[in-house]
Amino acid sequence: MKKLSAPFPSAHALVRWAVLLMGWVWLGQQGQRLGWSVASGVLAVALWWAWRALFAQSGFIHRLPRQASVWLGVSTVGGALGVASLAAGPMAHALLLVLAGVWALWSAFLEAGSHGPIANPCGAEASLPQTAMGLMMGSLWLTSSWCTTAGLPPATVVGFHVLLMAVLPALTSRWHLPPWAAQAGPLALVLAGSLVLQLGNGVAHGATGMALLALAWALQGPQGHALRTARRWSALAGPALLLAVGWYSPTLGPQVLQAAYGLLGAGAFLALLGLGLQATTRFVHHRTPGETFHEQH
């Protein structure tokens, strides 16, 4: 399989981050602008998220020529301009879904050129922090509309989320955690963030909970890495959860998002229990059968 590599890593990383951030923000905003009644306008961003996960796990992405990045970028920008110029209607909705697919392929292609081979896949455990962050960004415009009732303008809410996503990875990249902390830390932060969000819907609870979830995502590592290491079913769990939030939000409001974070917190708790059991098992196996504590020391 051909290994993709970026000739200018710094510029490539900047483009990759810009494409990722704009995917979350712009696709969600257009879904809201077009007034889509299906899943409260989050369908396009959920499909973009799902297709990115599928493309990232497919060998097809590595068979594309390097020049594909340019053509995919031009197609994405052209499609975005076309969608932005259309009024709400079937044509605008269809073009938005097509654009989500092209954008997903472009994002996955850029991610494929950013990381080397991946070893030791972790399954659903590795994807929990990424799912939490994706759910936060995918429901960004829903959250901003709910926060308007609390006196916060949508631009403030969006800016806060984008700031967390842009700044935290740069801050945590210099942290050198021991292996056990690098594995358990993000899960513990997902659990903590979920618990904070269950305590209330106020601004303080929301900001604190989101910050904890974003920190968990930043500590987990690059998103493309997690998309490729997660099993296919677990990688698609996040988009499915986002669709469920969008589907039930007209009747349940913020409570459906709160419940979704609660589900992720429960998953993080179970994963932490699993890590604890693994550590206990390794400790027991390291002890020679029949030896007492004093004999070992």
Image (tube, helix red, strand yellow):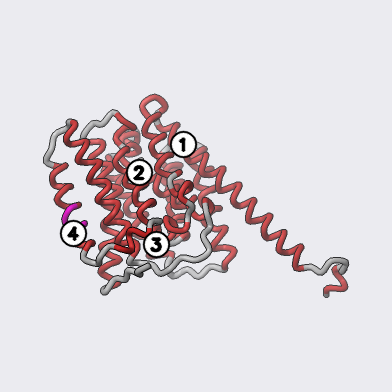
Looking at the rendering, the stretch of residues picked out in magenta corresponds to: 71-75
Q: Pointer 2: residues within 10 angstroms few (<14), some, or many (20+)?
A: many
For the point 67% across and 58% down, the residue is 278
- Tell me where residue 54 appears, x and y as whole percent: 38, 51
Q: Earlier in the sequence, mark 4 or mark 3?
A: 4
Q: Pointer 4: residues within 10 angstroms few (<14), some, or many (20+)?
A: few
Describe residue 264's horizontal placement relative to residue 93 as left or right.
right
Q: Earlier in the sequence, mark 4 or mark 1?
A: 4
- Tell me where residue 151 appears, x and y as whole percent: 31, 36
Give the position of the N terminus as an image quadrant: bottom left
- For numbered disc 4, what is the local secondary structure? helix
Contact, CB < 8 Å: mark 4 with mark 3?
no
Give the position of the C terminus as an image quadrant: bottom right
| Residue topped by disc 2 | 138
| Residue topped by disc 3 | 169
Using the image, determine if residue 138 lies above or below residue 218: above
| Residue topped by disc 1 | 258
For the point 30% across and 66% down, the residue is 13
| Residue topped by disc 4 | 71
Using the image, determine if residue 186 lies above or below residue 140: below
Contact, CB < 8 Å: mark 2 with mark 3?
no
